[in-house]
Image (cartoon, rainbow, N blue to C red):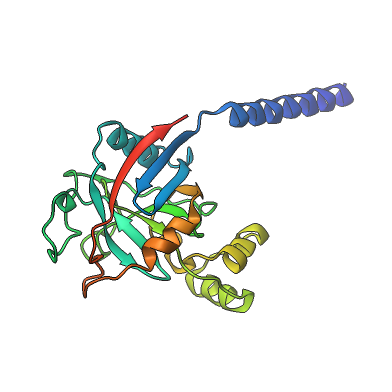
Amino acid sequence: MKKGWIFILIGFMIFNISAMSQKKSTEKVTKFVIHTSYGDMKGYLYNETPLHRDNFAKLIQEGYFNDLLFHRVISGFMIQGGDPNSRDAKPGVALGAGGPGYTVPAEFNSNLIHKKGALAAARQADQVNPKKASSGSQFYIVQGKTYPESQLNGIASQMGLTYTDEQKKAYETLGGTPFLDMNYTVFGEITEGLAVIDKIALVQKNSGDRPVQDIKMTIELID
């Protein structure tokens, strides 16, 4: 009788694992493309961060990002956009304070790291935003740099993080910004067009990190 229960339990576990695997493989993935004068960046949004996924997709469908600027660009770090005040902004005007009038609750996930190409949400500083809620529209795409294992281990130890071998490899070979992990919500990634990030990161900027020549974006959802 006990053996029978064991076989039933094992069969139930296999069924559940199979069902979960099938659900994951058939789960819809939200894909997008960002058009710029430097080329296109294609990527997808993570289902593990549904609040950010749905919000970003909604704004794309509304045309919210079209003709906005990459208003903050720091080589070796990231390129940032999504400020509605950047549309038709005059040269030299400081940007970065605009948004849709709401924030999105943080959705931190240790499986989602700031590797190169990561799409993450900008936010206000901890002093005024202790819950680390995300901007409703401003985002950044990681460029970062590569980290040797010893330095990465030091960062992980200091921040109380543990990286998988796969994550370590990404930071060691592809690069990224590990010091932002679990502090800013990563909700997607660029899979095609990583070189476009590098091109934009190298443009001439003013003292406020705004590109001297405007870099406009258009974002659309794709199949």
The percent coordinates of residue 203 (x first, y second) are 33, 67
Looking at the image, which is closer to me, 72 or 214? 214
Residue closer to the observer: 156 or 173: 173
Examine the image and state in which quarter residue 175 appears. Answer: bottom right
* Labels in figure, total: 0
Residue sitting at 77 percent across and 27 percent down?
A: 9
As displayed, is residue 166 above or below residue 144? above
Of 205 and 72, the residue lying toward us: 205
As drawn, 135 above or below 33? below
Give the side of residue 149 with respect to residue 92, left or right.
Answer: right
Judge from the rendering whether residue 194 lies leftward or rightward of residue 201; answer left or right: right
Classify residue 1 by image quadrant.
top right
Q: Position of residue 221 (x, y in %)?
A: 39, 33
> Residue 74's quadrant in the figure?
bottom left
Height in image: 176 above or below 26?
A: below
Q: Is residue 8 above or below residue 60?
A: above
